Amino acid sequence: MSAEDRKALENKVKRSFHTDFKQVEASRSDWDSSASVQYTKTPNPNWKFGDGANHTHTETSAKHIAIDPYEPGRSLIDNYKLSISAVVPRPIAFISTRSRDGSKENLAPMSFFQMINADPPLFIFAVNSPLAAAKDTLRNLVETGECVINIVSEGIIEAVNATSIDAPYGVSEWDISGLTPVYDCQTVSCARVKECIFSIEAKIESIREFDSRANPGTKSGTLEVVEATRFWAREDALNQERNVIDLSILRPISRLGDISYGRTLQAFQLPRPEFEKDLNGIQGFEELKKRRGDTHI
C-alpha cells in the first residue's frame, strides 16, 4: 500500500463521529487535574470459587451475533473500527526512531502494543504498513534495528496526539510536539522523551510481515518484536528495589475506540489464588463440580 493509498484509507476510516469536534469539546467538563488514583474493593469481595459473574453483570435477552470478517460487503475498515472499540484499553507505545545517518528522526504513537516476555524482556508493536511502503517508524527501524519506547502519561497526551499527523518523511515530530529529546541512551542512538516517566531502549528481535486478505498478493502490515536493552525510570516514580513504578506518578493514558483515550484513576487488587491452599486441591475441585452440577452451555 502506497502512502497515497494509506492516506485515502485513513480518510475512509472516519474515526470521529463529530463534524465540529471543538464545539463538542467546549460543551464538556474541564479536565480535573486534582483527580488522583484511588484503590477500591473488588465488585464482590465475598466472591467464592464457582460463583461466576458478580452483581455488575447484567442479564439480558440480547443475543450474541457472529460476524464473519470476510463476509460480502464487509470492509477491512469495519473490522478495524470494531476491534479497536472492543479491545480496550490499550497501552500506548510512543516510539522514537532515527535514520541510519541520523539526519531524520521520528516520533509516533502505537496502540497495537504489549509486553510479551520477561526473559528476555520482549515487547511487540504493529505498524499498519508493509515493508515496501514503510511508514517512518518502520523505515527507520529496519535501517537501524533500534528504537526507544516511551510510555504515555497525562502530561504529554496532546503532544503525543500531535505526532500522529500525516507529516512527510523527514519532518521531525519532535518539533511538531514540542517535546524534549534526550540523547543519553546507552545502547541505541535515538533519543528518549525527557517528559516521559518510563522509557525503554530496545533492539529488533524480529519483524513479521502479513499477507493482505482484502487485496490478495499484497502485504498489509508488520509485527515488530523488540528486546529491551535498557530501562529508564524517573527516580521519584521508582521504588527502592527499582522494580515497581508508582501508578499515581506514571498516570498512564490508554487508547480506546474512535478518537477516545482513557485515564487510569481507579484500581483494585486481587491476589492470584493457589490451587492447594485456596481451593483445597483436587478434593476441593471435585466438591465444587458436584455443587455446580451440569451448568455448561
Image: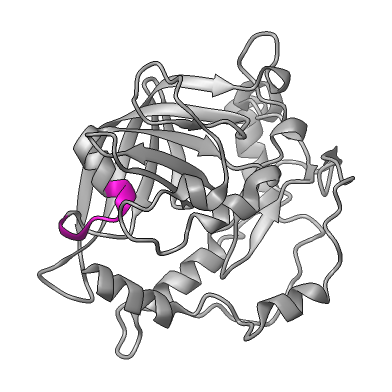
Question: Which residue is at the far top?
Answer: 241
Residue 147 found in image quarter: top left
Question: Residue at image x 74%, y 31%?
Answer: 249
Q: How is the image coloured?
A: one colour
Tell me where residue 245 appears, x and y as whole percent: 66, 25
In the image, residue 54 above or below residue 103: below
Question: Residue at image x 74%, y 80%?
Answer: 23
The quarter in which the N terminus is drawn is bottom left
User: Could you tell me what secondary structure mostly forms the magenta stretch?
Assistant: helix
In the image, residue 18 above or below residue 249: below
Q: Nearer the viewer, residue 188 or 62?
A: 188
In the image, residue 198 above or below residue 22: above
Question: Which residue is at the far bottom?
Answer: 73
Q: Which residues are magenta?
A: 132-138
Question: Residue at image x 85%, y 62%?
Answer: 30
Tell me where residue 151 appears, x and y as whole percent: 56, 38
Give the side of residue 231 with respect to residue 37, left or right.
left
Give the side of residue 266 with respect to residue 6, left or right.
right
Camera sees residue 189:
yes
Residue 239 found in image quarter: top right
Tell me where residue 215 appears, x and y as whole percent: 18, 75
In the image, residue 226 above or below residue 67: above
Q: Is residue 93 magenta?
A: no
Question: Residue at image x 63%, y 65%?
Answer: 260
The quarter in which the C terminus is drawn is bottom right
Camera sees residue 90:
no
